[in-house]
Image (cartoon, rainbow, N blue to C red):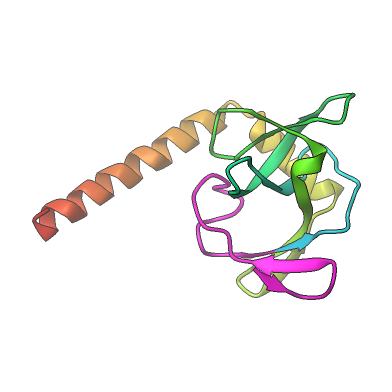
């Protein structure tokens, strides 16, 4: 993680859990570590008990303050305490163009997350990825 100032960090996320909105090693996200307002469909950076830092979307906020989070390409929900949250994504760079997280972005993500096409799109993407990787292994002789 690259520290921008005392309250902001930037880094390139690894992994496919936030696909298609954040692609593996393709975008730089900006996290505000001082932001305390968290809304549904925000992306938060939080720590798990084992020390892993995770970047996932808030799907629901319980009255007690606990968050229900999940990756955009995942179907498992995870309960996260606000005390685990290290920061909130306020924007990201995609091909050198900055995109701010605002209500319009949250609404777009909510529509995608709740769409019937999401499950089909995610399963198709990961199936194709497995097939391509298997073909690569065959040609490499492994």
Q: Quadrant of residue 65?
A: top right
Residue closer to the observer: 83 or 31:
83
Q: Quadrant of the N terminus?
A: bottom right
Asked which quadrant contains residue 140, the reply is bottom left
Q: Please state which of residues 78 and 136 is positioned toward the viewer in this rendering.
A: 78
Task: Residue at 17% x, 53% y: name it.
Answer: 137
Could you say where residue 48 lies in the image, as x and y percent from the top left?
63, 42
The region drawn magenta spans 1-29
Residue lying at 86% horizontally and 47% vertically, measured from the top left: 103
Taking the spot 81% from the left edge, 41% from the top edge, the residue there is 83
Left or right of 40, for residue 115: left
Q: Is residue 114 above or below residue 9?
A: above
Asked if residue 12 lies in the magenta stretch, the reply is yes
Figure check: 46 above or below 97: above
> Among all residues in the image, which is located at the extreme left?
141
- Residue 35 covered by magenta stretch: no
Looking at the picture, how far across and down is residue 130, in whole percent? 30, 43
* Residue at image location 63% in from the left, 29% down from the top: 115
Where residue 11 appears, as percent x and y from the top left, is 64, 66
Q: How many marks?
A: 0
- Secondary structure, magenta segment, majority class: loop
Indicate the position of residue 17 as horizontal and vertical percent values: 54, 44
Between residue 105 and residue 91, name the one nearer to us.
91
Q: Is residue 43 left or right of residue 128?
A: right
> Image quadrant of residue 61?
top right
Is residue 98 shown above or below 63?
Answer: below
């Amino acid at each position: 993680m690259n520290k921008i100032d005392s309250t902001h960090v930037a880094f390139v996320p690894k992994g496919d859990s936030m696909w298609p909105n954040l692609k593996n090693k393709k975008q730089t996200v900006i996290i505000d570590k001082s932001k305390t307002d968290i809304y549904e469909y925000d992306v938060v950076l939080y720590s798990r008990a084992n020390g892993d830092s995770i970047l996932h979307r808030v799907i629901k906020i319980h009255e007690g303050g606990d968050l229900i989070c999940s990756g955009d390409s995942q179907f498992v929900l995870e309960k996260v305490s606000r005390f685990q949250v290290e920061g909130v994504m306020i924007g990201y760079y995609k091909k050198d163009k900055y995109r701010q997280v605002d209500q319009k972005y949250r609404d777009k993500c909510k529509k995608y997350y709740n769409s019937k096409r999401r499950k089909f799109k995610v399963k198709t993407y990961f199936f194709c990825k497995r097939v391509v990787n298997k073909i690569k292994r065959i040609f490499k002789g492994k």
